[in-house]
Image: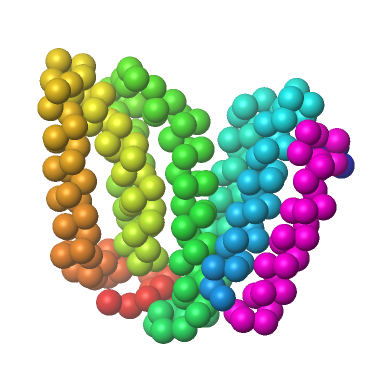
Amino acid sequence: LLTSIFFTSASGGIFAPVCMTVFAVFLHWQKFKVPISIAAMLGILVIYSNVNLLDSNIRDFFSPWMIVFFNLIAGLLIFRFAMYWDALDIKRIGRQSDTAFWLHLISAPMIVHPIFSGLGLMDKNLSLISSVVLLVLYGLFTFISLIIDRRIFILSSMVYFVHLIEVTFSEQGLGNFSLGFTGLFMGLSLLLLSGYWYQARRVVLKGLPEYIQAKVPGV
């Protein structure tokens, strides 16, 4: 089955070019150590895998849930890899931290989107329970972002929070105001992120065990 995924699908014809591209990026990393290179290699492989999973000859073997699950697991693995690079440069002064940044940049959407879409939180009609779940998840990703000192999880989940605002306004017959309020919310959120980020991190880190604090950047 795995062989058929990579060789017999419609995108099987680009298997060799994909491998050559990944190998070329790997050689570029070995020579120049450009931080984005590792994320680029993994991103190419993830995109290629998704193209194959969505191919008409392959998707009969998988339900949509399995594709969502695949992306979630891949995102978690890349996130773990990003944390490995972060741990090598806790003070954020070397290329290890830059490498981790790019890995977080691709892992966050791969984690956030499967969770939110898998729970049906992108539907036009959100129930009260779904709205509460969405808010809890948004708070959880904000908490994670503060711990690891990476804003990408907040930005990735903010899209779904904006969706909740738009749905709420539409249900109340205030659809014309949703765009303005959404812009106001995003502007205030970004302002708070930049102005009170370190104060919020200080509060969050105080409540964490010392062994966790030792693995993340200090304040």
Kindly identify the residue that appears in the image at 58 percent across and 58 percent down: 78
* Image: 23 above or below 67: below
Location of residue 70 in the rendering, given as x and y in whole percent from the top left corner: 64, 41
Query: Is residue 115 visible to us here?
Result: yes
In the rendered image, the quadrant that contains the C terminus is: bottom left
Location of residue 63 in the rendering, given as x and y in whole percent from the top left corner: 67, 25
Does residue 7 appear left or right of residue 121 in this picture?
Answer: right
Location of residue 160 in the rendering, given as x and y in whole percent from the top left corner: 34, 37
Kindly identify the residue that appears in the image at 66 percent across and 40 percent down: 50
Closer-to-camera residue (107/214): 107
Characterize the magenta stretch by its predominant secondary structure: helix
Kindly identify the residue that appears in the image at 72 percent across and 37 percent down: 52
Kindly identify the residue that appears in the image at 67 percent across and 82 percent down: 31
* Image: 93 above or below 217: below
* Residue 18 within the magenta-colored segment of the rendering: yes
Q: Give the range drawn in magenta.
A: 6-33
In the rendered image, the quadrant that contains the N terminus is: top right
Closer-to-camera residue (73/184): 184
Does residue 26 appear left or right of residue 107 in this picture?
Answer: right
* Residue 7 within the magenta-colored segment of the rendering: yes
Location of residue 113 in the rendering, given as x and y in whole percent from the top left corner: 47, 40
The quadrant holding residue 157 is: top left
* Image: 30 above or below 212: below
Closer-to-camera residue (204/17): 17
The quadrant holding residue 125 is: top left
